[in-house]
Amino acid sequence: DQQVKQNSPSLSVQEGRISILNCDYTNSMFDYFLWYKKYPAEGPTFLISISSIKDKNEDGRFTVFLNKSAKHLSLHIVPSQPGDSAVYFCAARQGSGAGSYQLTFGKGTKLSVIP
Amino acid sequence: NAGVTQTPKFQVLKTGQSMTLQCAQDMNHNSMYWYRQDPGMGLRLIYYSASEGTTDKGEVPNGYNVSRLNKREFSLRLESAAPSQTSVYFCASSEVLVGSQFFGPGTRLTVL
């Protein structure tokens, strides 16, 4: 049972336009949501996050929106740049006791920004 | 400041062989994690260590063992490798109260 779903395996966007990546989740216990970016042959790198008590977080060209009632979040990239071409993973955090937590990842969406 | 380092970068094993993947972080993080990434599957948690001296199973622990050697180092051992363990393995670390994890560059493992 997939608790974090990214239903679009790939997305192509023209340079300068908006990229919107979507993520759905099923577990109400998730308290924090994160987006990671991954280039080929590298480890994922943290991009932006949002607490479950907020509905929007913005960092430069990146904005994450959270709709708790719909259990849906989205990452907006404006304007999109060729360097944004990568795989984007949505992740959700849940406390696992002993002062730590686990992340559950979606399968990723490959974004291609066309010059 | 190297962040999270992993060795080796690549490894080919025969079925039944054993090996240990090494991970070290220099950020003084309490928690460390091992993930595997298979095509079309995202990242799945194998084991994690909330703090030095503790380890716990994640989503896919079968066939693996871990050791939290000290605060910096967290190793993953395959006692008897199987072709199903062919994957890319990522180590990560984090502070307890911070939402993000920092990942190493990965180890690409092939089991023949």
Image (cartoon, grey):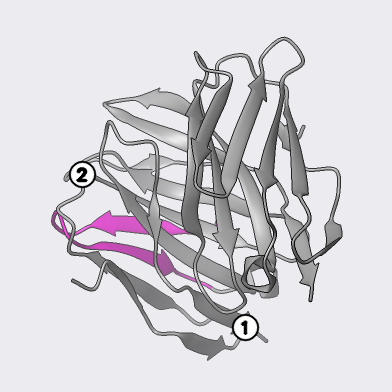
Residue sitting nearer the eye, B44 or B25: B25
User: Residue A68, position in %: x, y?
Assistant: 66, 14
Q: Nearer the viewer, residue B105 or A82?
A: A82
Say if A54 sits above or below A33 in the image: above
Residue A25 percent location from the top left of the image = 71, 27
In the shown orientation, is residue A8 left or right of residue A76? right
At a point 64% along the width and 74% down the height, the residue shown is B86
Which kind of residue does numbered mark 1 sit on?
Thr
Q: Chain of mark 2?
A: B
Q: Residue at x 17, y 45 (%)?
A: B52
Q: Residue at x 51, y 68 (%)?
A: B89
* SS for dot 1: strand
Comparing B34 with B64, the one in front is B34
Bin the neighbour count of mark 1 within 10 Å (Cα to Cα): few under 14, some 14-19, many 20 and up.
Answer: some
Q: Residue at x 78, y 43 (%)?
A: A6
Q: Which residues are magenta?
A: B61-80
Q: Is residue B94 left or right of residue A106?
A: left
The residue tagged 1 is B110
Q: Which residue is mark 2?
A: B30
- Answer whether residue B16 is visible to the viewer in this image: no
